Image: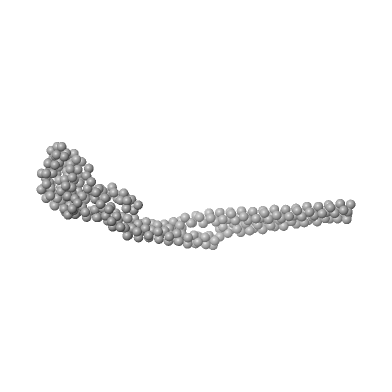
Amino acid sequence: MSESLQVLIDELHRRSAEEIKKIKSEAEAEAQKIIEDAKERAERLFLEKVSAELPTLRNKILGSVEGEARTKILLEKDRIVKRAFELAKETLIAIAEGKSGEYKYDEILYQLIKEAAVKLGEKELYIIANEKDKKLLSSNITSFQKRLSEELGDVYTIEIEPETINVIGGVIIRNKDRTKIYNNTFDGRLRTTEDRLRGILGKILFK
Amino acid sequence: MSIETLISEELEAKRKIEEAKKEAQKIIEEAKRKAEQILASASDPKRIQEYVSEKEDEYKEEAEELRKKYEEQLKRLKEFPEPKIKEAAELILKEVLKFE
């Protein structure tokens, strides 16, 4: 009896010790989970609170630097493109003054008239030009008329208007009743080219 | 050894288990108290301010890097080679003097 009772007591001790160990370890695990969950939740809450402020702060600090720098860069690029147009204009002035070895201005003047005649679809042409070009046109008027007629296959007449315009070179041409007008001056063509090429030039120059 | 001893041992074991349960409860209560503190720290203005200041410094460094990058770009543009501008001018001239 005594020996079997001892066995029972030992078993009782073993089981109770096991149960106590289990209770403690479960409690510790649960406690750890409570703390870990709280840490995660706290981190999430914290980030939610601060992240509302951060994009505004970042934009404020970086945005001002970026905005200012981009403006400076755009202005510099614009200066370079303007310089290219300025150089082109200087060459056009030299051409119009007959100082270019590469281009013959009287030939260019003829091409400007021919193109305008085609665009207007008129055969009686009235030309307005600057003072210097008026003289050049006067001395070439007969040959220009003849050449136009030959190349365009009809009879063309040219009249030089008494009024003058202040341009680098080129012509403004109108029809007889002034219902059609075509600006083929260097200045006008340069402006049109600028409108057309500005974007493309930017890409070519700054690629 | 008698049956009374066994009963007494059993009662003692039950007492120890009850004590362990109370201890476990205390551990969990303590954890809950700490969890509340941890959660409260999420709204701690001092901690928020410190974090924002830290981020502000990071953004300033980032901005400085950005400024340097743009300065470099601007420097290259200011030293833009004249021959390239002349090439562009020639392209413009060709366009102006291109007849249809």
In the rendered image, residue A126, in percent from the top left (x then y), is placed at 14, 44
In the rendered image, residue A189, in percent from the top left (x then y), is placed at 23, 48
> Image point 26% across, 50% down: which residue?
B91
> Image point 15% across, 37% down: which residue?
A153
In the rendered image, residue A69, in percent from the top left (x then y), is placed at 37, 58
Q: Quadrant of residue A125?
A: top left
Q: Is residue B9 left or right of residue A122?
A: right
Q: Quadrant of the C terminus of chain B?
A: top left
Q: Is residue A164 left or right of residue A6?
A: left
> Image point 16% across, 39% down: which residue?
A151
Q: Looking at the picture, does residue A125 appear above or below residue B36?
A: above
Identify the residue at the far right of this view.
Answer: A1
In the rendered image, residue B66, in percent from the top left (x then y), is placed at 42, 58
Q: Is residue B52 left or right of residue B40?
A: left
Viewer-closest of A62 and A119: A119
Identify the residue at the far front of this view.
Answer: A101
Q: Quadrant of the N terminus of chain B?
A: bottom right
Would you say residue A33 is visible in this rendering? yes
Name the image colouring.
one colour
For the image shown, how many numbered marks are present on the structure?
0
> Image point 17% across, 43% down: which residue?
A114
Q: Is residue B71 left or right of residue A163?
A: right
Q: Looking at the picture, does residue B92 appear above or below residue A68?
A: above
